[in-house]
Amino acid sequence: METNFLDQLIFEPLTRKNWGLFVELFGSKGACGNCWCMYYRLPKPEFREGKTEDGNKNAMKELVWENKPAGILGIYEGRAIAWCAFAPREDFVKLEKSRVHKRIDKEKVWSIPCFFIDKHFRRNGVSVALLKGVTGYAKAAGIDIIEAYPTIPTQEKLPDSFAWIGLYTSFERAGFEIVDRTSINRPMVRYYTNN
């Protein structure tokens, strides 16, 4: 695949208007195991319950219909090929309760806890392009600090199912810096849009 397709990616926040593209990208499995990107947003029992009868999908749809920030889509030739969750940190209840990734200061931050990239477009630099799209969107929206919790793999080739939190190298290439190493393999990284 030619990498110049990355220059044609368009980045949009998830809204009612592009909800259909999001649903198409996530497919019948809701990205992975009927998650629908609700894993970090719901307490564990609610999340587990939501994996049946479209519970998590409907919870995400409700967020979107209420015009709450959910994430950013990467769109190529009219279809969504990439997604990352992107919202104020306090919207992600699991992050707020995390011992490993607890807040390091009182700054208002927006978090990127997870990614999903169409399997036909993986390993082509899409995650870096998506992160650059997010930082551009954040600058335009007046969001000062973006925070994330990617993995530094302990093995050479990480299975795709473990890459949903993002790879540190992608964040590094997009200009993020490590701000906390409480977890050696899951550092906290930040991007400051006003630098």
Image (spheres, helix red, strand yellow):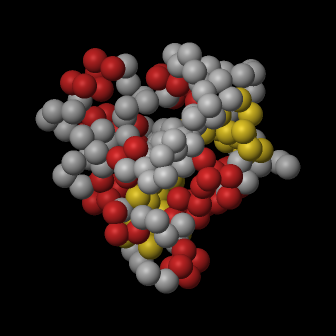
* Residue beneath the point at 42% across and 64% down: 122
**Residue 78 figure quarter:** bottom left
Q: Residue at x 67, y 39 (%)?
A: 189
Quadrant into which the N terminus falls: bottom left
Where does residue 96 sit, x and y in percent of width and height? Answer: 55, 20
Residue situated in front as seen by the camera: 13 or 84: 84
Q: Is residue 131 above or below residue 146?
A: below
Asked whether the viewer can see residue 31, the reply is yes
Q: Residue furthest right?
A: 195
Which residue is pictured at 68% across the width and 29% down the height?
A: 181
Q: Quadrant of residue 157?
A: bottom left
Nearer to the camera, 178 or 97 = 178
Residue drawn at the location 14% of the way across and 35% of the way down: 53
In the image shown, does 90 or 82 lie closer to the viewer?
Answer: 82
Q: Is residue 107 above or below residue 68?
A: above
Where residue 129 sits: x, y (%)? 58, 64
Q: Is residue 67 left or right of residue 189?
A: left
The answer to whether residue 14 shows anywhere in this view is no
Q: Name the spot of residue 5 as percent of width and height, x first.
A: 51, 79
Q: How many marks are shown on the rendered structure? A: 0
